[in-house]
Image (cartoon, rainbow, N blue to C red):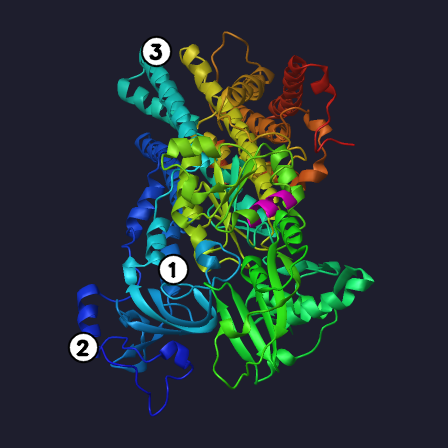
């Protein structure tokens, strides 16, 4: 190794002698080349992404899609190519839509790689040179200055006034002040000072690379995917069972085996609700659009419903529950105290101080400002921090109490930067010294400190960050070398300054709503436990009557089951949490059965965001890495937006149940003609055919189903815990098959029969074929469509009859039903579509009977709802619901 020598006749540009020193440091070019060849370049490992065809294949071959593939193949076998093609198109479109969402883990890792800077300055061959950051090797002497992003992990060899912003990595809201032999990490920022760092890890051995590996963890299936898989199994089992029964009947009644098999296939396909898959996808897309209008950007469609299933929220503190704006709120002096009520970094505020303490508070503020490195400045119409947020807060404090001098900018000052071992800094101007730092590092240097300890206890008990400020006289001069110990003695305590990072005003109400909704909330942060506890109490996360201690990340159990049991309660505060611990917290809670939403905005949050059931990132203050790993991005960084997103998620789950009921209802009406045909041994003709079933499922049914997916949230959707039942349960099956479906089926068969009766047919006679048969089939088809039109309004509520629901709350449904009726006329009367389906429309008698489907469905539905409310007692009968007419 060579000694540091001047560059082009002068010192290394931008670095002081305290950093460069004179001791040998750095590598030779030859050593660096060998190490680079041996260990590889300094970049994050590139994980080989899954081939696109495998990702697309996974979307086309999940169980729900396989059900429809089978239905499409069976349609071709049964001689119904139009039906088969339509089903295949639906599957492919859905797969392509979902395919775009599946590169999240790879994008998160890519964002992490982009965090590393392209250039770095090092000592090579004894001189300062700038190199590509990828060429850094272990042992390099890396030079850091204010504004640099650190390129590799390292150990500080020398430093002067160094402050490092690690908030994106650790969650700590205030920049750290590392000293000699302390570690710094790739991806962090230097916000103040300078340092010479010996590189200890590069590339895939850095701490940043460890986080990149954690973000690549594969996610478990979402609750919606699991429920759709279960529903598809139920539907598939029912379809196969019905097909087998009809195959047996057809053989028993003398139909040739081959023909009976094809007939059974047609029935099987008819039982599968082909319109369900696109309706689910489009409903989720509409939910995502509604969330976007409410400042929640959904990056993964199934996250819409997953949010509604959330039972546990793990939230970060800095920038999520708080505003990430340090502010002086209290000041104590021996002559009295002051309370400062200001907004952000604005230089004006309401200051409450006793007259006898006014001058002492100003002296305190002036000394604190003189001994700080941050400033506030006006930019883009608002006051912002320049430098360390805490240091800038001292400048704002001074201006708020009327201190406007600029002696801190004088060139003849002697400054001793903050040192993590001394835990204080000092400034000498014209023989006057100001010292600022941790109270336990400043108070012992003061001649008198009467009352300071009591004040310190009171302020820290509020969870405030406290600094002590002292002043004195010194004979030391700025132009003569000296040491901090020579000036930091025989001081007079000016007072204590207490700072806070204020919580967002909306958070307490949001937390109350979460509790009302049965959602547990825990703060999971890398910050100091006292600060975290203070924010928890101020926001209402930690209730005053609880005496639980703050949990520390380092003290959490390693066993996931034990950890899950420890965390399974509301209002927890977990502090000093690193990325790996956050990930384990998400895993432990999911293992305990919780649907976990993890919020965050920093790099440290990315692994847990990826592992949680729902990752929620901040859009404004969040890092690209966090946004790439999340399912939902809050565009306004407002914690309250989570509540509106959960409300939309719950509403989406309810809406999916609504249109699932709607789709399954007409399956009964579609199947009933086949049942009657089988029971009559073929003597009663089929009222509708398979192509008419297709026209219903992916034609007339689709628009009302989508409109049901747009039903607005019930005002009481957050009153009570999330629905834990299945998407397809006994209640839906009973309502769809035994109530709504039977009403439609009865009217459809009645309309079919009435057409023949009006033409002179009587029981015991043979049914005629030809035009009359087509008209009767058109009447049955019309009855089902009209019944579904009424059913769309009936499915809006599980409790109230359709006529008690306001149409204004879902005007889209009115338009959708109108489109459905227009489609009915097209399918009945416009060739060549009408020719392929019914050949002709219903007769007058057939249409009049078919129209009875509307009152039949509405009245049967109302009776069933009244019966179910009666079983719950008088309170349920009298209780109004959102959407009811007032």
> Residue extending furthest bottom?
9
State the SS at label 2: helix
Q: Residue 518 carries which label?
A: none
What residue is disc 1 on?
112
- The reply to whether the C-beta atoms of the residues labelled 3 and 1 are less than 8 Å apart is no
What residue is disc 3 on?
253
Which comes sooner in the sequence, label 2 or label 1? 2
Q: Which segment is the magenta one?
A: 531-538
Q: Which residue is at a point 55% across and 57% down the rendered structure image?
A: 440
Crowdedness of circle 1 by 10 Å Cα count: few (<14), some, many (20+)?
A: many
Distance (Cα) linking label 3 and label 1: 69 Å
> Which quarter of the figure is the N terminus placed in?
bottom left
Number of numbered labels in the structure image: 3
Which comes sooner in the sequence, label 2 or label 3? 2
What residue is disc 2 on?
30
Q: Return the x and y of residue 586 as percentages of the image width and height.
A: 43, 40
């Amino acid at each position: 190794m060579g000694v540091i020598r001047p560059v082009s006749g002068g010192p290394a540009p931008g670095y002081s002698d305290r950093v460069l020193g004179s001791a040998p440091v750095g590598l030779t070019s030859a050593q660096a080349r060998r190490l680079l060849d041996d260990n590889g370049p300094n970049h994050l490992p590139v994980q080989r992404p899954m081939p696109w065809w495998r990702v697309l294949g996974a979307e086309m071959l999940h169980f729900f899609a396989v059900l429809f593939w089978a239905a499409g193949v069976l349609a071709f076998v049964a001689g119904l190519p139009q039906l088969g093609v339509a089903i295949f198109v639906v599957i492919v479109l859905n797969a392509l839509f979902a395919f775009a969402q599946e590169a999240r883990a790879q994008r998160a890792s890519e964002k992490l790689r982009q965090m590393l800077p392209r250039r770095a300055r090092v000592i090579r061959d004894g001189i300062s040179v700038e190199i590509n950051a990828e060429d850094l090797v272990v042992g390099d002497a890396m030079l850091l200055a204010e504004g640099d992003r650190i390129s590799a992990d390292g150990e500080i060899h020398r430093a002067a006034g160094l402050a490092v912003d690690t908030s994106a990595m650790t969650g700590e809201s205030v920049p750290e002040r590392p000293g000699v032999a302390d570690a710094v990490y790739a991806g962090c920022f230097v916000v103040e000072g300078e340092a010479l760092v010996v590189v200890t890890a590069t590339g895939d051995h850095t701490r940043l690379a460890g986080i990149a590996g954690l973000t690549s963890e594969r996610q478990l299936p979402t609750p919606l995917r699991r429920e759709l898989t279960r529903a598809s199994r139920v539907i598939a089992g029912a379809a196969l069972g019905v097909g087998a029964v009809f195959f047996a009947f057809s053989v028993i009644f003398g139909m040739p085996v081959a023909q009976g098999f094809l007939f059974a296939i047609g029935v099987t396909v008819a039982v599968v609700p082909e319109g369900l898959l696109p309706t689910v996808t489009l409903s989720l897309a509409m939910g995502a659009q509604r969330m976007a209008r409410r400042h929640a950007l959904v990056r993964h469609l199934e996250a819409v419903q997953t949010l509604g299933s959330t039972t546990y929220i793990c939230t970060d503190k800095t920038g999520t529950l708080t505003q990430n704006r340090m502010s002086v709120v209290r000041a104590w002096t021996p002559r009295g105290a002051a309370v400062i009520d200001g907004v952000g970094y604005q230089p004006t505020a309401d200051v409450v101080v006793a007259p006898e303490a006014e001058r002492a508070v100003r002296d305190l503020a002036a000394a604190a400002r003189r001994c700080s490195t941050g400033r506030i400045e006006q930019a883009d119409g608002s006051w912002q921090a320049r430098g360390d947020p805490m240091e800038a807060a001292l400048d704002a404090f001074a201006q708020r109490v009327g201190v406007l001098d600029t002696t801190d900018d004088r060139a003849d000052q002697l400054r001793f930067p903050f040192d993590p071992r001394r835990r204080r800094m000092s400034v000498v101007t014209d023989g006057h010294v100001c010292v600022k730092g941790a109270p336990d590092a400043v108070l012992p240097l003061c001649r008198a400190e009467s009352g300071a300890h009591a004040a310190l206890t009171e302020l820290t008990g509020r969870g405030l960050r406290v600094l002590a400020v002292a002043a004195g006289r010194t004979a030391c001069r700025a132009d003569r070398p000296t040491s901090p110990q020579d000036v930091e003695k025989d001081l007079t305590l000016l007072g204590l300054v207490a700072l806070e990072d204020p919580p967002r005003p909306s958070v307490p109400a949001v937390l109350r709503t979460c509790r009302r909704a049965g959602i547990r909330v825990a703060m999971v942060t890398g910050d100091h436990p006292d600060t975290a506890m203070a924010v928890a109490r101020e926001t209402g996360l930690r209730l005053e009557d609880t005496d639980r201690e703050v949990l520390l990340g380092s003290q959490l159990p390693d066993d996931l089951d034990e950890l899950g049991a420890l965390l399974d309660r509301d209002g927890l505060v977990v502090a000093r949490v690193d990325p790996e611990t956050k990930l384990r917290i998400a895993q432990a809670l999911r293992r305990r059965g919780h649907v976990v939403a993890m919020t965050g905005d920093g790099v440290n949050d990315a692994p847990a965001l990826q592992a949680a059931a729902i990752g929620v990132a901040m859009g404004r203050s969040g890092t690209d890495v966090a946004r790439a790993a999340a399912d939902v991005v809050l565009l306004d960084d407002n914690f309250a937006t989570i509540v509106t997103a959960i409300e939309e998620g719950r509403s989406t789950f309810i809406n999916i149940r609504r249109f699932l009921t709607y789709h399954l209802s007409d399956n009964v009406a579609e199947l009933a003609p086949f049942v009657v045909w089988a029971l009559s041994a073929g003597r009663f003709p089929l009222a509708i055919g398979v192509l008419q079933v297709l026209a219903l499922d992916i034609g007339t049914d689709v628009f009302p189903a989508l409109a049901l997916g747009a039903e607005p949230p019930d005002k009481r959707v957050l009153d009570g815990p999330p629905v834990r039942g299945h998407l397809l349960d006994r209640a839906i099956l009973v309502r769809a098959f035994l109530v709504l479906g039977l009403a439609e089926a009865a009217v459809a068969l009645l309309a079919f029969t009435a057409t023949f009766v009006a033409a002179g047919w009587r029981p015991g006679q043979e049914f005629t074929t030809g035009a009359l048969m087509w008209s009767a089939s058109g009447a049955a088809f019309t009855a089902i469509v009209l019944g579904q039109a009424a059913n769309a309004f009936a499915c809006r509520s599980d409790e109230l009859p359709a006529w008690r629901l306001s149409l204004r709350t879902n005007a889209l449904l009115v338009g959708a039903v109108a489109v459905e009726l227009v489609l009915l006329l097209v399918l009945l009367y416009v060739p060549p579509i009408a020719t392929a389906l019914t050949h002709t429309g219903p007769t007058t008698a057939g249409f009049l009977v078919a129209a009875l489907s509307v009152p039949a469905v509405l009245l049967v539905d109302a009776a069933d709802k009244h019966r179910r409310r009666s079983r719950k007692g008088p309170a349920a009968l009298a209780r109004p619901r959102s959407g009811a007419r007032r």
